[in-house]
Amino acid sequence: MIEVNDLKKEYIEEDTTTRALRGVTFKIDRGEFVSIMGPSGSGKSTLLHILSFLDRPTGGSYKFLGKSIDDMNDRELAHVRNKDMGFVFQSFNLLSRLTVYDNVEIPLLYSDIIPRERKKLIEDAVIAVGLEEKLHIETGKLSGGQKQRVAIARALVTDPNIIFADEPTGNLDSESGLQVMEILESLHDKGRTVVLVTHETQTAEFANRIIKIKDGLIESDKTITTNRDHCSGQLK
Amino acid sequence: MTSKDAFKTAIRSLSHSKMRSILTMLGIVTGIASVIVIMSLGDSAKQYIVGQIQSMAPNMINVQPGAPVMGGAPSAVMGLVIKTLRARDVEALEREPSITNVSPNVTGSSRIVYGNKSKSTLWVATTANLFKMTNLNFSSGYGFTEADEIGYKHVVVLGSKLAEDLFGSDTEPVGKTVRFEDITFRVIGVLEPKGSGMFSMDGYALIPLSVGQKQIRGIDYYQELNIQIDPTYDTSFVKTRIVSILRTSHQITDPTKDDFMVTSMDETLSMLGNIMSILTIFLAAIASISLVVGGIGIMNIMLVSVTERTREIGLRKAVGATDKDIMIQFLIESVLLTLTGGIIGILVGAGIVGLIYFVLTTFFSIGWIFAFPPLAVALGLLVSGISGIAFGIYPARQAARKNPIDALRYE
């Protein structure tokens, strides 16, 4: 599904060049749950932005579903983001004055899905995160955990091939964080590809593969055979 | 994004900051209302003046002595004494079948005295025909007759304002005597007030032509001819006939040597209409400056809105919105603001125009005409819509150009 080869990203500001990614190579297959880990400034968020078509690399190649990012214009990238990708952000990025329903509807506004088919998709997505009773509540009135669940519903509503989650538990207490991770895990269990960026080990361990990044290079890329201990019931 | 979704999204965004939207619209409301009021009042004034002229002197053609002038006042008005209009001209014109009446005039100014009151006034010496040609009505008494004119009778008809100034409201002027130019005149009639229109006779004294021309001025020419045409004839045809008759009478063979100027009431009305329209457009253009100010206000608020909603823009882009989608969304918001402002401005303008009409007709007894030209409404809507695009395009472009990552990180 994802194939990156010698991926590089440099930021040039005046006389200073910052090399955020210095040649990263890996593949992600359909149905994988991958955590990208690394300390602050390691390049993990830059990598996620490129993988999720929010940014372009300055070197190397990136193919998504067999198609190179270099062959797509901004309009096509936007179309792929809408159709094939779902996003979950650390800070939720919900429009607080809109209801759960209206927030979840946002990606559909830019899709080819006709308005009369939207209602069921939105309700299904909200049911999938267990917030059906909050459907017409403004998201500003929800708790942090509930907000992130709305964000997951919004990521799910277009039935994307892959979900990108950038520090999804970063702003949550441990209990809410666990709920969010369990939802992401259940989505993976149903066959969806999930790519997660985190600096928390316990969050990363929900994945079946952990790619560690340091100074813009892959430090390690390990597949976890033994799943984490769910009995603990909490994230640290 | 469907247009319905785009409108829904824009309305939702605007309704989330109602007070700001209302305040932003105020500039456009004021601008559009000003333009509407000026255009409507201009139209009303035009209709009022034209109506006044038409009611005073329907089917009239005016002949002034002196060569025709293009774009300037007639020579006679400029103080030159031109003696080309004579009795033989009037006789020749009266024989023309397309002409109903001819009324030659001689004018002057004198101090008119009644008892211990006096008033400087303009007098018009004319024939009895004038009362037939114009819609002058009498509040008391009657006009002079042909017999009065032939008999050099010292009778006078006073305009309503002049009568009021000399006699006050308690004394009936008819039957009293007034004095000017060392002649004592018996008041035989008082005209109904006509208001302050340009053809108003309210401040004038009307006397028989023979008295004014021969006894007071001692001249044998006329200063003006007013001609009433048969309405079954075409005005331009009659005008051509008058020119032809006067050229024959004055033995003029070269048309460039005309010593008279013929103006039909149609031409006067058309000229007045043009002047009023130009004046209205000029005033509306000045008022539209406030529209530009309002538009700049819209642009300012839209720029603030774009900055405040940077994260929203980032999110929308992340989930699939293109630059065009974002641009259209903000443009629709801007156009909705100005268009709503425009509609409110039109309603406010209509309210002000209605209020002015009510005040003028109720408290000042002016026969004002309520005019609310559809062109002003169409123009108001068009201008407000265009200003929404013109002043919204820059903020919308700013929004559309935002990098999604930077926008999502914006604090």
Image (cartoon, coloured by chain):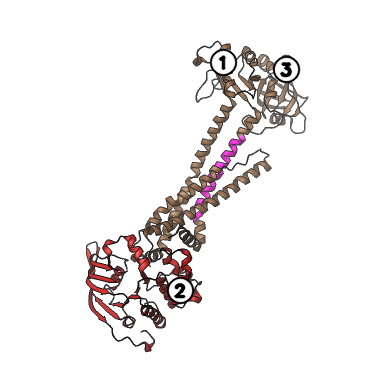
Give the SS element for disc 3: helix
Q: How far apart are labels 1 and 2 at the CA level?
A: 93 Å
Q: Which residue is mark 2?
A: A124
Is B38 located above or below residue B195 in the figure? below
Q: Which residue is mark 3?
A: B146
Q: Is A202 in front, or is B212? A: A202
Q: How far apart are labels 2 and 3 at the CA level?
A: 100 Å
Task: Determine if residue A211 is in view.
Answer: yes
| Chain the render paints red | A
Q: Are marks 1 and 3 in contact (CB under 8 Å)?
A: no
Q: Is A217 in front, or is B161? A: A217
For badge 2, the amino acid type reads Asp
Disc number at residue B244?
1
Q: Are marks 2 and 3 in contact (CB under 8 Å)?
A: no
Point out the stretch of residues depicted in magenta. Answer: B24-48
Q: Quadrant of residue A37?
A: bottom left
Q: Is A76 in front, or is B200? A: A76
